[in-house]
Image (spheres, rainbow, N blue to C red):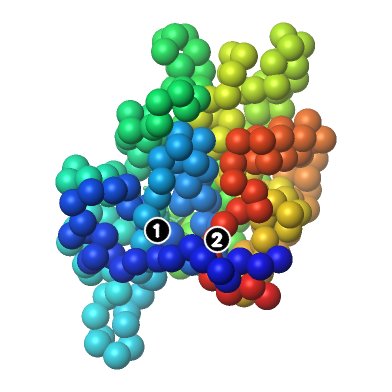
Amino acid sequence: MQTSSGPDFIGLEEAAAMKTGTRVTFVPGMPAVFSEALKNICFVKGVPLIRVVHPHMGIDKATGKDRQEKLYELTSQTGLPTMFHNEERPRNVWIEQLALAERIGAPGSPSLIPDDFELRSEALGLCAVVMGEDGMVWNMRILIDTPLGRKYGYSEEACSNAPDKVAAVVSLIDRRLEAQEECGSQYLVGKTLTAADVYWATVSISILPPPPEIMPVTQQNKRALEYFAMNSKIPAISKALSPRIENHQRYILTTYCETPAVLGGDPL
Ligand SMILES: N[C@@H](CCC(=O)N[C@@H](CS)C(=O)NCC(=O)O)C(=O)O
C-alpha cells in the first residue's frame, strides 16, 4: 500500500505564522486517534487541511531543549492535535475543533452537530464518553504503562479497571446501534450522520483495527496497529465487540471518510 507520495507537512512555526487556511498537527505515518478523527471530521465537512508536524514529547538531544516548548508557547498545552484557522485562537480540544469545523464547513456538507437540541444532546453525549476524560480513548491509553499513559493517570489500579471501562463504552455503542437499526437507521443518532458516527468509527480503530485497504500499514504505525490488534483481544473488550460494531465502523469509514487513510510517513 503506497502512502509515500504525499501528503506534505509543514513545520509548526510556519503554520502558526500563516494568516489563512486551516492547519492541523499530525504525526506523519501515524493514525493518532484524535488527529485522525479531526481529519475525518474535516473531510466530511469539506474543509481542506494543511498538515503540520506535531513535535514529539521529550528533550531534543542536540539542543537540550524540550521539543514541545514552542507548541506550549503557542497553545498553552501540548496535546495532539492542535488546530489553527485563519488568525483565530488555536483550538486544542475536540469539541471546540468540531464546532469550528462545523462553522467553516463547505456549503452543502453534512451537518455533524444536529440543530435539534434533543438529538444534539445525544450526539455530543456519545462523543463525550468516547473522546472525553475517563472515556473510551482515555482508558484505552492506560491499558499499558507508557509515558503517554502516565500523563493520563496510569496506575496499576487505573490500568486494571480500564478494559471494563472500554468495554462498557463499546457495549453502550452496540446497544445504541441495535436500537437505531430497529428504527431503520444505520447511524448512532437520528436518521443521518453525526459527529458521533465519525468520532466513534475513527477512534474505535484503537480497539478494532480495520484492514489495510482502510488503514494502510506504514513504518511509523506498524507497532501501533499491532498494539491496537492486541487491545481487540483483551477478553472484556473482545466480548463487547460485535459484528454490528465492526459493520458500522467499516461503513462510516469507507462511505464518509477518505479511505485508504492518507497518513504520510513511509510505506513498509
Ligand atoms: N486535548 C485533546 C486530547 C488530545 C490528546 O489527548 N492527545 C494525546 C495523544 S492521544 C496527546 O498528545 N497527549 C500529550 C499531551 O497532552 O501532552 C482533546 O481533548 O481533544
Q: Quadrant of the N terminus?
A: bottom right
Q: Residue at x 47, y 27 (%)?
A: 109
Q: What percent of the width, then of the height, locates residue 246? A: 76, 38
- To which quarter of the image does residue 136 belong? top right
Q: Residue at x 56, y 69 (%)?
A: 5
Direction from residue 129 to residue 247 in the image, left or right: right
User: Is 125 in front, or is 152?
Assistant: 125
Does the residue at mark 1 contact the one at mark 2 (Cβ under 8 Å)?
no
Q: Residues within 10 Å of mark 2 (few under 14, many from 20)?
A: many
Q: What percent of the width, then of the height, locates residue 228? A: 67, 57
**Residue 255 image label:** none
When the figure is inspected, residue 74 is found, relative to residue 267, above or below; the finding is above
**Residue 263 image label:** 2
> Can residue 95 be seen in the rendering of this structure?
no
Q: What percent of the width, then of the height, locates residue 193? A: 58, 24
User: Is 223 in front, or is 216?
Assistant: 216
Amino acid type indicated by mark 1? Arg
Distance Cα–Cα, label 1 vs label 2: 10 Å
Q: Which residue is mark 1?
A: 51
Q: Residue at x 33, y 33 (%)?
A: 104
The mark nearer the N terminus, 1 or 2, is 1
Amino acid type indicated by mark 2? Leu
User: Is 212 in front, or is 72?
Assistant: 212
Direction from residue 75 to residue 9 in the image, left or right: right
